[in-house]
Image: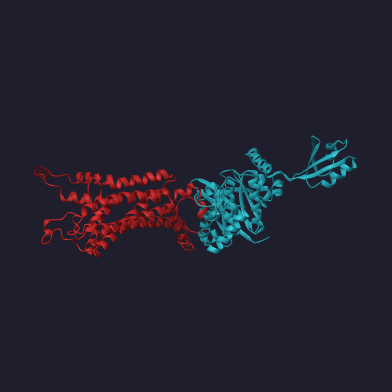
Chain colours: A red, B cyan
Amino acid sequence: MARRSGSPFTGIGAVFVKELADHFGSARMRVLEWLVLLTGVGAVYTAISDLKTTTASDPFVFLRLFTHARSPLPSFIAVLAFLVPLMAIGLGFDAINGEFNRRTMSRILAQPIYRDALLLGKFLAGLATLAAALVTLWLLVVGFGLVTLGVPPGGAEVARGLSFLVVALFYGGLWLAVALLCSVLFRSAATSALLALGLWLLASVLWPLIVQFIANAVYPPSAVTLLLGGGPSLGQIELQQALSRVSPSTLFDESVLALLHPATRALGPVFMSQLEGSVMGAPLPFTQSVLLIWPQATGLVAGTIIIFVVAYIAFQRQEVRA
Amino acid sequence: MSEVILSARGLSKRYGRINAVAGVDLELHRGEILGVLGPNGAGKTTTILMLLGLTEPTSGTIVVDGFDPIRAPLQVKRRIGYLPDSVGFYETLTARENLRYTARLAGLTRAQAEANITAALKRVGLDTVADRRVRTLSHGMRQRLGLAEVLMKGVELAVLDEPTSGLDPQASFDLLDIIRGLKADGVAVLLSSHLLDRVQAVCDRVALFHQGKIVLEGTVPDLARRVFGGVYIFELDFDGDVDAVSLFSALPGVRQAFATDGTTRVLADRDVRAELARAVVASGALLRRLVSVEPSLDAIYRQYFESRHGTA
């Protein structure tokens, strides 16, 4: 089979610019942004009122802005973990089927571009929109912190904050890819949105429960541990953790935990013997924290790429006939 | 004959066990309008999509201006302008913005795009609504906007799928006028349609699709001769007390003559207008009208399928 001539990226710029303009102008995006902004500000505001008392003693006071929670309000990152996927799905669920439903698909594909350019352009535009929203929000939080706390963030804090931004962006990218895949597979935008949201609920809410159940069934607690009131066996914990890491929300939570809580030393079970000689509660250097979450972060990136590739293959095989 | 811009040989497409297109041969020359006709599901749109490289043929070859749509789709799509069946636009963008997006996709430079868009919109008569959102445009305006897109691209082959469907008579006449303009520019046009009489008015040649094959192809008079078995039809009006039927039936070459409501119709094997005129004048009657009647595409179409069903 001879190769096709011409670059698959012809026209990608045009698609990117158009989609970006659409996203920024769309009412949907505005609603999502306000939602994120209001909940984010609420969470940060309560955090700040609490943090003012510990500003002097806490070396990572800026990171606390992100992670501090006072019930009933969740912390800022909990809000983001919830809303970033929602935003990503909102941006992607009608990307491809929308073109079919508007009957613009055959007209666009009749232009001298490959389908690659259309799909990739839409994905990158969605990612750029997410990035813009996240960066804005991040700067707002940091700025808010600067004004109210009155101390500048340290270098390590900035590095950790920025890494958190990158991880959050890929977490959103993964859900954007899922939404894009749904929009390729289903002609109805409602079905696509529902499936993408369903998958998200499954991954973030139901999966942890299912995982617990499976691990319990595979490694049932022995009579001795039940009698002595001991915790779950090591096998059970490890299986549970391995399975739960299939869900991108676990990967995101773990990455954020290690990045924004510098004292986090391990994400799995730790034995007493391993803690010998360690200074409890001492923060890890930034690079060590990054090393700790490297598998989680690469997992998120890999997941994004794999799901995008599946969407890509499905789109390539699709009939253009509207 | 002028240069061949599009040629397809043995084109076929299978969807599972269904033969959507089964061995289609097509040829189109520069500045020619080819009408593709046929009932729904006859394989017209599938053929069009294969020509554009949007669907891969199961077998057969296509050459568009020297390029294969499967191997060099970008080259082919740069040369073809496509107006899909019931074309859609981005509703929230203006007409001009919609064209601007396609112009960018087509790889036109900004200055070139602006000039082409303005010219194209003017040509299809949409210059006054160029900056209105597409949402507010009527169906006819959208079809014309689709044609403007084809014009703007500066193509060598325009493929128009049902451009007049759903349009009122005036709107479709306007549209066909623009299509004639394309032909005058030396653009080859492939036009698929149900509206037979309108198509007849603009097409140089027609190809009749039936069950994935081209069953008839040629100019309209050509097809008429083939379907009606080489019959010429004439109509005469004259004043005078003459027994028209017996008078004309006796003439050489005339098959049949019959009179209805004062008009006489004559079926003949060849052009017998001169003989008919002479016979009328010789009989002492006053000849008012003598015309050769072209069978309409509609009649050809119906006759063709009726004779098929008769033999089947």
Q: Is residue A40 left or right of residue A53?
A: right
Is B15 located above or below residue B73 in the figure? above
Residue drawn at 44 percent across, 44 percent down = A188
Whether residue A5 sits left or right of residue B182 in the image: it is left
Which x, y percent locates residue A17? Answer: 45, 58
In this view, the residue in front, B189 or B56, is: B189
Q: Quadrant of the N terminus of chain B?
A: bottom right
Query: What residue occupies the far left of the structure in this picture?
Result: A228
Q: Point out residue B305 in the picture as x, y percentages from the top left corner.
A: 64, 41
Whole-percent x and y of residue A269?
17, 54
Q: Nearer the viewer, residue B240 or A285?
A: A285
Residue B282 in the image, given as x and y percentages of width and height: 90, 42
Number of marks drawn: 0
Q: Can residue A175 be seen in the rendering of this structure?
A: yes
Is the C terminus of chain B in the top left, top right, bottom left or bottom right quadrant?
top right
Please identify the quarter of the rendering in which residue A58 is found. Answer: bottom left
Evaluate whether residue B214 shows in this view. no
